[in-house]
Amino acid sequence: MGYIAIVPFFLVVILYELAPLAQLALDSVIGRDSEALGLENYIRVFTTPLYTQSILNSVWISLLSAVVGIVVAFLAARFCSEASPRVRNGFTMILNMMSNFSGVPLAFAFMILMGNAGVLTLIGEQFNIPFLANFNLYGSDGLVMMYIYFQIPLATLLLIPAFAGIRKEWREAATILKASTFDYWFRIVIPNLMPSILGTLSVLFSNALAAYATAYALVMNNYALLALQITSRFRGDVQTDAATGGALAMVLIALMVICTLVNNYFTRRAAKGREIV
């Protein structure tokens, strides 16, 4: 009965993950023009300025939003770990609501606040605040801000359990040994949290790299992003281009796999160093 119960899970994995992945891999190696097996599609991807710029923009925005998100989330998770149970429960509830507020509703909310005629934009013009009055929501600055917005609650929720593993005895021992606050955080706490920090950073990078709905609702196809280019190849206004779309999708998958492998390597090293200490 246990094997029978797991059959639906394997069916979902095969139909919605492995089969589409195999189709993408097959489309990526069948030439769009020659219809022969080869690397024609990948050569087009890495020699077309639009596609290379899309890859660079996606990596840059994902990395920047992940780093900023992990820094803010670290401080928020520290606050949550030191707060009272009542404050912690309320804070966690707010984080859960924020983490689910993404996609088209998030883009619409930012348009209302910081669009060309948004509330904050009009306030900036009224009180001569250049940052608000001249902020370009429909470009890289707006995308980075929105990505950071939905990265922070996710990262905080992932780091809160890690802070729960910090023992009070460590602080007492550090105080007895006359260690400064800097030494306590950067020689004891952060090295012990490093595997969780690196794992969360990898999740944030992958989350931003594959984000689509929020970016499309804000800039549509007016900004070069990898996820937007992949979708446009399979849902073109005139015709579809599954060959190029498959190659772009495989590049996206390769970036996520590389990020995961690099993260696993540094996580193992961090965990090994922590065991030695």
Image: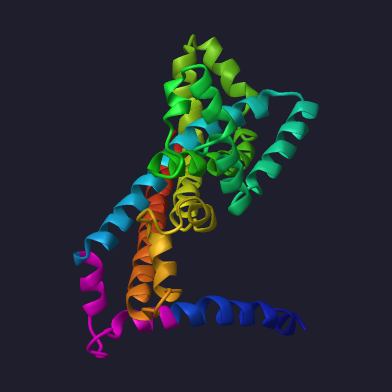
Give the magenta-colored segment's residue range: 23-46
In this orientation, which residue lies closer to the viewer: 271 or 18? 18
Q: Residue 11 location, x and y as percent?
A: 63, 82
Horizontally, is 69 left or right of 35 in the view?
right
Asked if residue 46 lies left or right of residue 206, the reply is: left
Q: In front here: 43 or 159?
A: 43
The colouring scheme, among rainbow, by chain, secondary structure or one colour, is rainbow
Question: Does residue 3 appear in this view?
Answer: yes
- Residue 187 shows in this picture: no
Q: Position of residue 41 (x, y in %)?
A: 26, 76
The image quadrant that residue 226 belongs to is bottom left
Residue drawn at (41%, 59%), measured in percent from left and top? 221
Residue drawn at point x = 43 percent, y = 83 percent = 23
Q: Residue 44 in magenta?
A: yes
Could you tell me residue 213's position as x and y percent?
54, 57
Q: From the viewer's perspective, is residue 233 above or below residue 100?
A: below
Q: Quadrant of residue 25?
A: bottom left
Could you tell me which residue is drawn at 32 percent across and 57 percent down? Answer: 54
The C terminus lies in quadrant: top left
Depicted 153 relative to depicted 226: above or below: above
At a point 19% along the width and 66% down the height, the residue shown is 47
